[in-house]
Image (cartoon, rainbow, N blue to C red):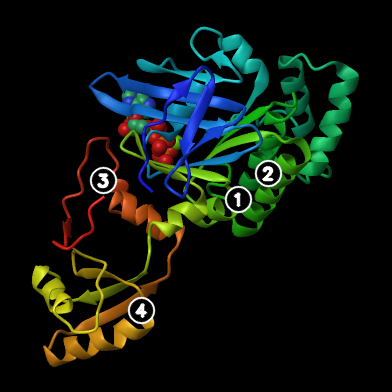
């Protein structure tokens, strides 16, 4: 479902639900209202975004490189000032009451911040002191957290001897030392192997269940966001272009997508498919040498399409069938795959390589 403007009445925020209506977000702990950040050189990193996150939610912020995810987190965690709009975390304005905001939040930044020259435990102790956690309480929490992230055995080794995954896990436990109500995780699993990613997610899920902590995270891993997030906002070029539950986002995809690689894809190929009897074409685009076709059921449509291509002497190099997934939803909303557009990541950049079929559904 496309993102729609929300409205506010007092502190009560409303959000679009997957049925097309609006529901109140009770106890919104993050409220973002027309937030904007323009860097010098007119770089619109965050372009008037509005959304809110309810207490206890795992909220995923998904978007390609340069979409504005880290900038948004920087504003919400009071490290960067916005150039427009407003944001509240735990009822406190991030510009007017930054210290009150900081008391209630934890942050695991995209870049590693742990000190290599200290041991894991010393890093944790330093963090506890920074947040003024009383010594005896800190000692107890450090032991619990090191156990949670499975670093007990390496706690007294210098961090420079840790692997990347161990450092990330240490960062996570540091972000939790003062028991924040809202935890911001910027790419918590980026660069980790599958096993470490899975265990990281287990920790995050456990935290949510045990503490009702609100978790605001960014990720490039759509499957993970799908499995773990209660709601997902898709951000692209500084704008929130979709906001819904993973199920709601997938519902927007509708049918199956068939990707057919040919020597050269153009509108004629889409016309061939469009003219075929018995094919209910929901959507069609050409990108480079790939035709992406959406049909209600690929099982019945694909043989017909391939037969027709053969009879018209259109050579097919490969065929991929995609069932409705979050990847697909991302593609629907942005016109691109999450991982294939490093070069197109500048705000304001328009993807020139995609030629939309003329029967593309409008939204
Ligand atoms: N301090 C800055 N000065 C100028 N431009 C900046 C600054 N910080 C970020 N930007 C630009 O703002 C845009 C958004 O950057 P941001 O780091 O928020 O993206 P992101 O979604 O977190 O990307 P990634 O997935 O690569 O981490 C980018 O075009 C980036 O180059
Ligand atoms: Mg980032």
Q: Is residue 208 above or below residue 355?
A: above
Q: Which residue is mark 3?
A: 344
CA distance separating discs 4 and 3: 30 Å
Closer to the observer: label 1 or label 3?
1
Residue 179, image x, y percentages: 74, 27
Q: Earlier in the sequence, mark 2 or mark 4?
A: 2
Whichever of callouts 1 and 4 sits on the residue coming sooner in the sequence is: 1
Taking the image as drawn, is residue 173 in sight?
yes
Horizontally, residue 43 falls left or right of residue 50, namely left
Residue lying furthest left: 268
Which secondary structure lies at badge 2?
helix
Q: Considering only order in the chain, which callout, 3 or 2, is on the residue closer to the N terminus? A: 2
Q: Tell me whether circle 2 and circle 3 mark residues in contact (CB < 8 Å).
A: no
Q: Position of residue 83 (x, y in %)?
A: 35, 15
**Circle 1 sits in a helix, a strand or a loop, which is it?**
helix
Q: Nearer the viewer, mark 4 or mark 3?
A: 4
44 and 230: which one is in front?
A: 230
| Residue 257 lies in quadrant | bottom left
For the residue carrying disc 4, how many other residues have a C-alpha within 10 Å: few (<14), some (14-19), or many (20+)?
A: many
Residue that label 1 marks: 228
The total of numbered circles placed on residues is 4
Dot label at residue 298: 4
The residues bearing labels 1 and 4 have C-alpha atoms spaced at a distance of: 28 Å
Please tell me whether mark 4 sits on a helix, a strand or a loop. Answer: helix
Labels 1 & 2 near each other (Cβ < 8 A)? yes
């Amino acid at each position: 479902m496309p993102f729609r403007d929300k409205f506010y009445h007092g502190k009560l925020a409303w959000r679009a639900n997957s049925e097309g209506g609006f529901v109140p977000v009770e106890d919104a702990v993050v409220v973002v209202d027309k937030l904007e950040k323009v860097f010098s050189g007119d770089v619109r990193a965050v372009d008037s975004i509005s959304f809110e996150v309810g207490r206890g939610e795992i909220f995923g912020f998904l978007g390609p490189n340069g979409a504005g995810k880290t900038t948004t987190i920087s504003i919400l965690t009071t490290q960067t000032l916005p150039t427009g709009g407003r944001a509240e975390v735990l009822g406190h304005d991030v510009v007017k009451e930054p210290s009150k905001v900081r008391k209630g939040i934890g942050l695991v930044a995209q870049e590693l911040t742990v000190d290599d020259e200290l041991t894991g435990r010393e890093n944790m102790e330093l963090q506890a002191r920074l947040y003024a956690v009383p010594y005896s309480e800190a000692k107890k929490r450090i032991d619990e957290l090191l156990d949670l992230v499975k670093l007990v055995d390496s706690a007294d080794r210098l961090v420079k001897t840790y692997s990347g995954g161990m450092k990330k896990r240490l960062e996570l436990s540091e972000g939790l030392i003062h028991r924040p109500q809202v935890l911001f995780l910027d790419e918590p699993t980026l660069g980790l192997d599958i096993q470490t990613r899975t265990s990281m997610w287990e920790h995050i899920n456990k935290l949510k269940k045990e503490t009702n902590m609100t978790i605001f995270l960014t990720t490039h891993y759509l499957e993970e966001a799908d499995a773990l997030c209660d709601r997902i906002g898709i951000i692209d070029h500084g704008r929130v272009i979709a906001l819904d539950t993973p199920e709601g986002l997938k519902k927007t995809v509708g049918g199956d997508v068939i990707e057919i690689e040919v020597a050269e894809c153009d509108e004629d190929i889409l016309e061939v498919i469009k003219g075929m009897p018995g094919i209910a074409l929901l959507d069609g685009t050409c990108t480079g040498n790939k035709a992406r076709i959406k049909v209600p059921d690929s099982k019945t449509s694909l043989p017909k399409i391939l037969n027709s291509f053969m009879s018209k002497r259109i050579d097919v190099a490969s065929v991929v069938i995609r069932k409705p997934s979050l990847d697909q939803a991302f593609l629907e909303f942005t016109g691109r795959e999450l991982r294939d557009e490093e070069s197109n990541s500048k705000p304001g950049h328009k993807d020139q390589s995609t030629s939309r079929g003329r029967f593309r559904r409008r939204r």
